[in-house]
Amino acid sequence: MDADTQIGGANARFPDTRPSAIEAAGSDEAARRGPGHEALVAAYWKPVYRYIRLKWRRSNEDAKDLTQSFFTAAIEKRYFLSYDPRKGTFRTFLRVCLDRFLANDRKFESRQKRSAELVALDFDAAGPESPEAIFHQEWARSLFEDTVDELRRSLQVRGRGICFAVFERYDLAETPATYDQLAGDFGISAATVTNYLAAARRELRSLLMERLRAVTTSDSEFRREARALFQ
Amino acid sequence: MISDKILARLKAAAELPDLSGTRYRLIEEIGRGGMGVVYRAEDPELGRFVAIKVLDEGNEARVLASLEHPGIVPVHEAGVLPDGRSYYAMKLIRGTRLDAFLAKTPHLPDRLRVFQRICEPVAFAHARGVVHRDLKPANIMVGEFGEVLVMDWGAPGVGTPAFMAPEQAAGGEVDARADIFALGRMVELLIRGEERLPKPLASICRRATQQQPAARYGGALELAADIAAFLDGMPVSAHRESITERLLRFASRNRTLLALVAAYLAMRILVIFWIGR
C-alpha cells in the first residue's frame, strides 16, 4: 500500500492489538470459533437486546429471551460465515440477520399474537427512526458503556482513580461540574483537571478503537465504523 | 444506561484531537465533513489562530501543499496525532460559505463574478493533475472582499450526490470533467430563483452538466470564459444565438451608441422637414 494512503500516513498507530472476532467466528477451527463467538456476543448483546425492546417493542423478558435465541441460532447455524465485507459493515449485516430471524421465528410470531402490547410489526409504524438508525444508536451506546467500564477498571488498577473520577464528574455527569469546582473538590489545579480529562479521553478513544478493530475485518471497514461511531 | 445527551458528549470528547504534542491549543470544533473534522486552534508562539483539520484517511495535506494558489487555503504544517489520526494546520479563513454568501447576495452578476473566481483555483489544480471530486458550496469560502478559497482537497472520491457527475456516482474513473459537472451544478444553484433566466446561462449550465464527460467544457477556465462573456454581453460558446437574440444583445451592449444614432437621425429628419417647408 502506498504510504500516503495508509491511515494516518506511514507512522500510523491504529489499534491492532485485538484479533478480529469476526474472522475468528467464521473460522473452520472450533478452537478459534469459540472465542470469536464470545467476543461478538459480548459486543452486540446489548444493542441487539435494546433494538428488540425499542423497535420490536418487546417486554424485558421477551427481549432477553429473543436475544439469547438469536445468538444461539447464529452460532449453531453459523450465520457469520455468510458475512461478506464487500457488501457492507458487519453491524448492518447483523441487524439484517436479526430482522430476518425475528420475522421468521415461530416462537416470536406466536408471542406476537398473544401480546396485547405489541402495536405493529411494521418498522415504520414503530417510530420515525429507521431500524438502521436505532440499531446504530444502541450499538454506539453499548460500545461507549462497555468502554467506559473498561476505562474505569484500567485507570483504577493503575492507581489513577482520580483521573477517572474527574472524567466521571465532567463527561459522564448530566450536568458537568466546572473546571474550578473539580479543582476545588479534588484539591488539584485547573491545569491538572485539564490534563486528567485529556488523558482519560485519550485512553477512552484508544480503547474504543481497539474494540472497534475487533469487530471489523478490514482497514476500510474499521475507518467507516470509526466515522459512523462519532456521527 | 447512559443517556443520549451523555452519549453525544462522550462521542465529542473521544473525538477531540490530543494536540498536547503540537504547538497548538485546541479551542473549538468549527466544521465537519465526510473526511474529517475542523477545529479552531491557537498558535501561541506566533500569536495567531489557525484551523486544524483531523483526518480519518486521505492525503489532503500533501495535495494542498502541492497547490500554492491564492484560491487554495495554505497549509502551515502536517503531522500525526498520538492516536494515529493525521492532522494538518492551515490558515483560518474568515468569511462565509458560498451557500450563506448566495443567501445574502441576490444580484446575479455579483454571484457570477464570485463563480468566475472559483473556476481559477480549480483550473490551477487540474493543470497539476489534481481533481477535487467534491466541489460544492459547503467547500467554498467567500472572504469579506469577495476573495474565494476552495477547500477540502484530497477527498478520496467520496463526493456529494447533488453535485456528483454520473461517472463518479457510478464509481467509475473520474477526471477533471467531474469537477466541471460540479461547477455546472453550482451555476444552476446561482441562477435558481431568477425570474427570467437568460438563454445563454441556461446553455452554460446544460453544457457543463452533460451526462457524457466529453460533451462538457474542456476546462474550468473555458467555463469561466463563457461566464465572463455573458457578463460582458458577448456571445457564449455554449449557445448558438438566433438573429433576434444577436440584435437584442447588440442593442443591449450598445445602448449609448444607438441612442446617439437615433438622436442624430431624428435631428436630420427635423432639419430636412424644416428646409422642405
Image: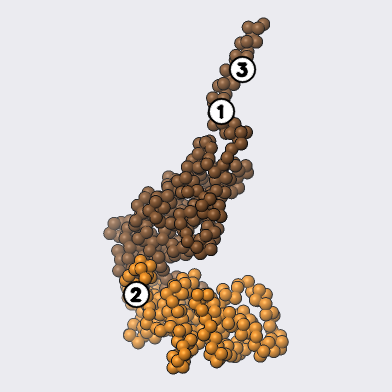
Chain colours: A orange, B brown
Q: Are marks 1 and 2 in contact (CB under 8 Å)?
A: no
Residue at 34% across, 57% down: B65
Q: Nearer the viewer, residue B104 or B268?
A: B268
Q: Is mark 3 on a helix, strand or loop?
A: helix
Visible in this render: residue B78? yes
Residue at 63% across, 84% down: A102
Mark 3 lies on residue: B266
**A93 relative to B176 in the view: left or right:** right
* Label 1 Cα neighbours within 10 Å, binned few <14 / some 14-19 / many ≥20: few
Residue at 71% across, 88% down: A114
Q: Is mark 1 on a helix, strand or loop?
A: helix
Q: What residue type is labelled 2?
A: Arg
**The N terminus of chain A is located in which quarter?**
bottom left
Q: Is residue B264 above or below residue A16?
A: above
Chain hosting mark 3: B
* Label 3 Cα neighbours within 10 Å, binned few <14 / some 14-19 / many ≥20: few
**A197 relative to A58 in the view: left or right:** left
Q: Quadrant of residue B202?
A: top right
Q: Which mark is residue A178?
A: none
Chain hosting mark 2: A
**A112 relative to A39 in the view: left or right:** right
Mark 1 lies on residue: B255
Mark 2 lies on residue: A13
